[in-house]
Amino acid sequence: MIRAALIGFGWWGQNIARAVQGKSEHLQFPLVVTKEAQQASAAAAALGMRVADDMAVALQDPDIQAVVLATPHSLHAQQIVEAARAGKHVFCEKPLALKHADAVRAIQACQAAGVTLAVGQNKRFWPSMVKLREVVASGVLGEVLHLEGHYSNEHSTKFFSDWRSSPAESPAGGLTGTGIHIVDAFVGLAGPAAHVTARVHSTRQGHDPRDATSVLIEFKNGLQGFFAMVRATPLYWRVHVFGDQASAEALGENELVIRHRGGRVERHVFPAVDSIRVELDAFACGIPAAGRQTVPYPISPAEMSDAIALFEAIVQSIESQQPVGVPS
């Protein structure tokens, strides 16, 4: 059992704690770190966690093997570096960083320290997306020609915080909240991107914003794809890969539709999973431990870097209203 400190105990940090604590066979949280330590004490105690108000407490504790970061986006890179220097394995909620150079710095710090780094892209672990990657890798689609995606939800309405309207913490409409999941999915399916053109249409800013973001991508392998996201509309997820023999479309968490040449259609519906616990279990199983085989985290450091490179280029394209090359 890996003993980890949960850094951050806001809405999402509490979701992580509830998904893992007393339920995971691989990870537990003896400690939570939050600036609101006094206010969080009752909720933390109910989950069997002691509370500290400084990440240094976790980094200096020899009983803590790892940290799970559920902190503001702008803090991620430096916190990863500090944790790696302290010899702690790191799970970082998405996005890994806001700049490609910072993502590279964080990844290199973990590699130099010999610690495991994982990024919290829980949609990677949805049954529909696991099956989609399997189908694409099988070759049944033939030559892959195109990708499409969409992810919208109502989180800006239901769970709004001031940082969600801050360009420094949440640029490009819903990119850090929703679009980053499509970015990760596309990189996992098509590899690194070369060029991007993106736009945001906004009708209301500030609390409970109204905006839609559209992104057109050219990948280094020549494929093209596009995706969109809307921050204030009912939950909808779609990732669709088109080949010359078939197409495969992941719809929501648990459904995959394969459309073959000639009109044959396969529909798969999978049992639901707790994707937060599954991704954190995958992180724990990627940490070397006596008596068991280590399983590498399914998102590679190269994919983490490529995703933030594409993320940064999308932000730059929106700000400049021009096509942008993706850093490498």
Image: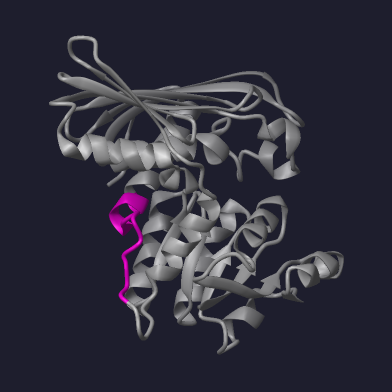
60 lies above or below 66: below
Query: Relative to the observer, which residue lies in front, 301 or 44?
Result: 44
| Residue at x 47% of width, y 63% of height | 281
When the figure is inspected, residue 255 is found, relative to residue 87, above or below; the finding is: above
Image point (46%, 79%), residue name: 85
The answer to whether residue 322 is left or right of residue 53 is left
Asked if residue 94 lies left or right of residue 58, the reply is: left
The answer to whether residue 210 of the structure is visible from this angle is yes
In the image, residue 152 lies at what x, y percent? Answer: 56, 27
Q: Is residue 137 above or below residue 199?
A: below
The residue that appears at 28% across and 38% down in the rendered structure is 189
Q: Position of residue 113 (x, y in %)?
A: 37, 78
Write the start and end of the magenta stretch as one range. 293-305
Q: Residue furthest bottom?
A: 62
Depth order, front residue of 249/302: 249
Occupied quadrant, residue 103: bottom left
Q: Position of residue 39 (x, y in %)?
A: 86, 64
| Left or right of 323 in this view: 214 | right
Is 303 contained in the magenta span?
yes
| Color encoding of the figure | one colour
